[in-house]
Amino acid sequence: MVEEGIDLLICGQLGSGCTEVAEIIASKMKMTFFNTEKLLHRLAADLDLSFSGIARKSTSGEVEIDESLSGLITSYMHDKHMKRVIIEGRTAFMAFMEPATVKVLLTAPIYVRAHHISKVRGIDYDKAQEDIESSDEDRGHLVRRLWKLDWLNPSLYDLIINTGAWSYEQAATMIEEALKSRGITKEV
């Protein structure tokens, strides 16, 4: 068990179910989870801006989003009151080299991910596939820029789950078991 740090990092390819799996685990194990959207809302509040104000400042270059989010993650990790934390999705890559009890990679075939993104975003399948390809490239660049690593290197993770072969509920159960094996149990 890691004394200080993040309990769970769920990294993944867009459409592989990071948010859904994190929500299941957070609910079952009474944990708090953060992703880019939640952290951007927190950043906007900290800067006394609206969510759209953050977007404008990011686009204009006044606020460097990746660095700002990375700073928020670091502050959460050192906040002694912040316990039982899951960081998921693209944001997990920003905390990738920080101590974590369990690091997970969720993956799935592109057709599975495109179907999921198409449904969640209400866009057509081809547009979803384009978004996924762009996101995969973006995540690769982000991890190379921040950590000089290949984000799909399996040796970087404790657990890799193909959500094309397992349901989100099954994936969450596997991750819960990994957490339990490292001393993180359901809080009552």
Image (cartoon, rainbow, N blue to C red):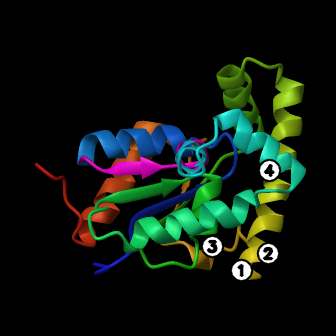
Residue 53 to residue 67: above or below: above
- In the rendered image, residue 97, in percent from the top left (x then y), is placed at 57, 79
- How far, Cα to Cα, is label 2 from label 1? 5 Å
Q: Which residue is mark 1?
A: 147
Question: Mark 4: which amino acid?
Answer: Ser
In the rendered structure, find residue 144 and report the number of the disc placed on it. Answer: 2
Question: Mark 3: which amino acid?
Answer: Pro
- Badge 4 crowding class, 10 Å Cα cut-off, few under 14, some 14 to 19, many 20 or more, is some
Q: Residue drawn at (33%, 64%), measured in percent from left and top?
A: 178
- How far, Cα to Cα, is label 1 from label 3? 15 Å
Location of residue 54 by image quarter? top right
In the rendered view, does 24 fall on the left or right side of 87?
left
Location of residue 160 by image quarter? bottom right
Foreground tag (3 vs 2):
2
Q: Residue furthest front?
A: 48
Question: Mark 1: which amino acid?
Answer: Trp
Q: Residue drawn at (65%, 36%), measured in percent from left and top?
A: 51
* Range covered by the magenta-colored residues: 30-39
Q: Is residue 6 visible?
A: yes
In the rendered view, does 85 fall on the left or right side of 87?
left
Residue 59 to residue 95: above or below: above
| Cβ–Cβ under 8 Å for marks 1 and 4 | no
Q: Is 33 colored magenta in this rendering?
A: yes
Q: Residue drawn at (16%, 53%), measured in percent from left and top?
A: 187
Q: Earlier in the sequence, mark 2 or mark 4?
A: 4
Quadrant housing the N terminus: bottom left
- In the rendered image, residue 134, in percent from the top left (x then y), is placed at 87, 47
Q: Which residue is mark 3?
A: 154
- Badge 3 crowding class, 10 Å Cα cut-off, few under 14, some 14 to 19, many 20 or more, is few
- How far, Cα to Cα, is label 1 from label 4? 22 Å
**In what element is the residue under mark 3?**
helix
- How far, Cα to Cα, is label 3 from label 2? 15 Å
